[in-house]
Amino acid sequence: MHDPAALRSMHLARFNAEPAIFVAPGRVNLIGEHTDYAEGFVMPVAINFATLAAISPRTDGKIVIYSENFGEEKAFDAGVTPKAHKDWSDYPMGVVAILSGEGHKFPGFSLTLWGDVPLGSGLSSSAALEVVTALAVLSLIGASYPGPQLARLCQRVENEFVGANCGIMDQFISANGKKDHALLLDCRDLSYRLAPIPENVAIVIANTMVKHSIAGGDYPTRRRESEAACAIIASHRPGVPFLRDATLEDLEKWGHEMEPKSLMRARHVISENLRTVAASEALLRGDMKELGRLMAEAHKSYSGDFEGSCVEADTMVDLAQDLPGLIGARLTGGGFGGCTVNLVEQKYAESFAKTLGERYAAKTGIVPEIHVCHASDGAHRME
Ligand code: ADP
Ligand code: MG
């Protein structure tokens, strides 16, 4: 599936130059939704869907980027500060812009991009693209960053250049994921620990086929609402700059001062943080039953208090409940569509995926894409 030789041939045919090849994975978040920008905890895994980049230097002072996914080539002048064009090239050119801002100087280059992370489905094709581009362009100038720092820079691409107000999770797991492990990340100081996923557990990702967009209105609205709740708590109890520092008792005391929606959003974020840490502990001791229970609770909170789900995602979660082998199911990612993540006993994974797909199609009239995945390594050079 991720064949560097195929990308190399494509690059050679188009640009007539031998490339270096890099890969960065998409991700699925097992638990911890909308906690990252509250400086809380998340627990994603890198998945076996990824974006590959082939890069070679040019001598004509141009940056030429081809995306096989879009079948489109874009050209820019190296040395001119990039501006956002509101298309896919903003992600790779944003990487050039942010890294240039850090003092790096890039020569012209040719970059070929290809990925099988479904675009705009909540599996973070955007972070995979940023991280793989960063590795590729840094290799041109013989520079590198430790994974956590690289993730921060790529997050800035999305925040400052693309204009999507996302947290650090997606870029972090794409840069630092580990095969067969979930990663509990403390979004405050970027410390993390890895928890092994038992061999007999599959990650089944079910795409509702309803598109989400975190640059759209709902994500920033939810973020503002939860931050407004935090400001009220902080007005009574300084030392709560983020909801990570707040407790459910704070909501009991001062929730009445909040807009009802703000209170609901905050209740989700605060409880989700507690669930995420508990989930990592459950995974570390191999208690899959408890992990599944926490995932179910998380979905309820995401859909109810956070109103971050949609009819189709709720349906996908409901339809999984009585299927053999299910450990836990919930909507994953920024919300309002996208994918559900299901932990399923490996021996049931294929039949689970098939039946869930049939049930969803029968109920909604939409044919979903359902993938049986495993946790994969973070970004690296392939050849
Ligand atoms: P998600 O990250 O959940 O997939 P986003 O809306 O954040 O959704 O990012 C999707 C966008 O990222 C695409 O619309 C496109 O602009 C860009 N993108 C991702 N992968 C590629 C690729 N291989 N080639 C070009 N652009 C890509
Ligand atoms: Mg994205």
Image (tube, grey):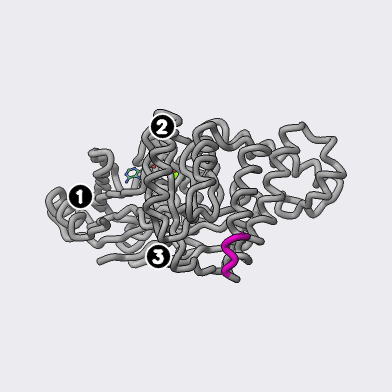
Q: Looking at this view, is 169 or 323 the one in front?
A: 323
Q: Find out whether residue 39 is within the magenta segment.
A: no
Give above or below for 44 relative to 320.
below
Q: Is residue 95 visible?
A: no
Give above or below for 7 relative to 305.
below
| Left or right of residue 223, residue 371 in this image | left
Q: Quadrant of the C terminus?
A: bottom left
Q: In the image, what residue occupies the spot 29% across and 55% down? A: 53
Instruction: Identify the residue at the far bottom of this view.
Output: 285
Query: Looking at the picture, which amino acid does disc 2 mark?
Result: Ala
Sequence order check: which comes first, mark 2 or mark 3? 2
Sequence order check: which comes first, mark 1 or mark 2? 1
Label 2 crowd (10 A; few <14 / some 14-19 / many >=20):
few
Q: In the image, what residue occupies the spot 43% across and 37% down? A: 359
Q: Which residue carries the number 1 mark?
A: 60
- Region rendered in magenta: 286-290
- Badges 2 and 3: C-beta atoms under 8 Å apart? no
Query: Looking at the picture, which amino acid does disc 3 mark?
Result: Asp
Q: CA distance from mark 2 to mark 3?
A: 36 Å
Q: Position of residue 278 (x, y in %)?
A: 66, 61
Q: In the image, what residue occupies the spot 43% across and 52% down? A: 204
Q: Which residue carries the number 3 mark?
A: 377
Q: CA distance from mark 1 to mark 3?
A: 35 Å
How many marks are shown on the rendered structure?
A: 3
Q: Quadrant of the N terminus?
A: bottom left
The circle drawn on residue 362 is 2
Name the element at disc 3. Answer: loop
Q: Looking at this view, is 117 or 318 the one in front?
A: 318
Q: Position of residue 259 (x, y in %)?
A: 77, 32
